Amino acid sequence: MQADPSDLVQRAQQGDQAAFEALYRAHVGRVYALCLRLTADPVRAEELTQDAFVRAWERLASFRGESAFSSWLYRLTVNVVFLGQRASRRRALRVFTTDDPAALERPSDGSGTGAHLDLERAIAALPPGARQVFVLHDVEGYRHHEIAELTGIAVGTSKAQLFRARRLLREALSR
Amino acid sequence: MMCSDREVQLSEYVDGTLGVEARALVEAHLAQCAGCREAVAELRALLAGAAALPKSIEPGRDLWAPITARIVQRATWNVQRAFWRGALAVAATLVVGFALYHLLPSSTAHDRREGRGWVAVQADYARATDDLAAALATERDRLEPATLALLERNLGVIDAAIRESRDALARDPENIELRALFAAAARQKVELLRWATRAAT
């Protein structure tokens, strides 16, 4: 029988690592998918997934249950990705090769169809700014003002990046 | 081929974010423009595809082991750091207090006891602890629960020591050893609060 999520959160808040591991098992796929789509870099996505869960453990006390734990965790993950991005701008840029989509071919629910993979590859090949806004808006369902708040860009920039991403994706998928 | 100047409008049309009038204008245009109708169909297919992407992708390896190692390492590090900072602060205060008590000429020590220096020292400690406690109050949620509990336990112990020193000084205001004890406890509180605000930010 699965444990009650709110009970797991409460136990984890009291320092119960087994409860936190259960939360990790329940959410790691979603957190990793988010990191992977935002970065288009499987190695970086693994690092950021670890960072997100370590940060979640450290900040568990600030989770008051006003939203679902999953929403809180995914927002925290987006924050971690963008904080990491700002930090990594000061380091050497990683090179992503779009002909290495293996990591995008492991959907946990077995629903990776050909159309999905074409779209995943096309998203991964987008310029970073356009890709990130597209993933947050059209895949994750965030609104432009939320994206602006999470990423530190202006609402107008978020809209412009989304339109650009959609144009580039339509072009890529119609080839 | 869609009309190039309609790109933004068609995207907003598909999102359903256009006002009534703008929407009617787009629909009137779509009725006579096959290229834009095709673009709208492609946009809708793209959005449906994006919404249908798998929400979960498993990482290539289990990440729990490195995560738990980092959690344990940080907790140990935080407690060790707090302990050594506290211990160093106590040691430094005791050394300074001992030196002042034994090295200063008695007249100087008397002047310091009677003069404004002692009042200023107490005021400095009070101001520092108030500032740091206020800063910590806004950031305390960032500390992990175990660290927060440890911090509050230690602050309770130090506050009790400060209260006892103050009570003793009220009975014997010129006792320099009591002043050194008070200063040691106050200094320890400042150091602990300083560490906690740094750890929380």
Image (cartoon, coloured by chain):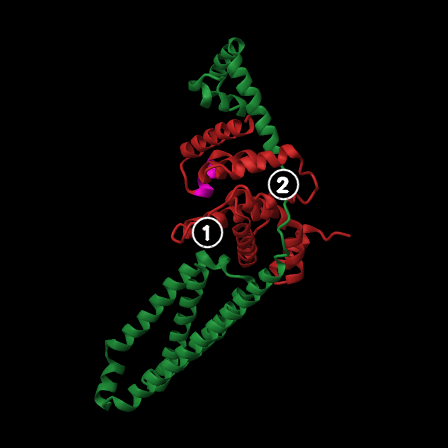
Chain B appears in which tint? green
Question: Disc 2 designates what residue?
Answer: B55
Residue B94 placed where, x, y %? 37, 84
Question: Disc 1 designates what residue?
Answer: A84
Q: Residue at x 58, y 43 (%)?
A: A101
- The quadrant of the image that shows the C terminus of chain A is top right
Residue A91 placed where, x, y %? 40, 54
**What's the CA distance linking mark 1 and mark 2?**
22 Å
Callout 1 secondary element: helix
Q: Residue at x 47, y 75 (%)?
A: B83
**Does residue B2 show up magenta in the picture?**
no
Q: Quadrant of residue B44?
A: top right
Count neighbours of disc 2 (C-alpha within 10 A) and say few if under 14, some if 14 to 19, many if 20 or more.
some
> Do tag 1 and tag 2 residues touch (Cβ < 8 Å)?
no
Q: Is residue A68 visible?
A: no
Q: Is residue B112 above or below residue B132?
A: below
Chain A appears in which tint? red
Q: Amino acid at mark 1?
A: Gly
Residue A77 placed where, x, y %? 53, 48
Chain ID for label 1? A
Q: Which residues are magenta?
A: A145-151
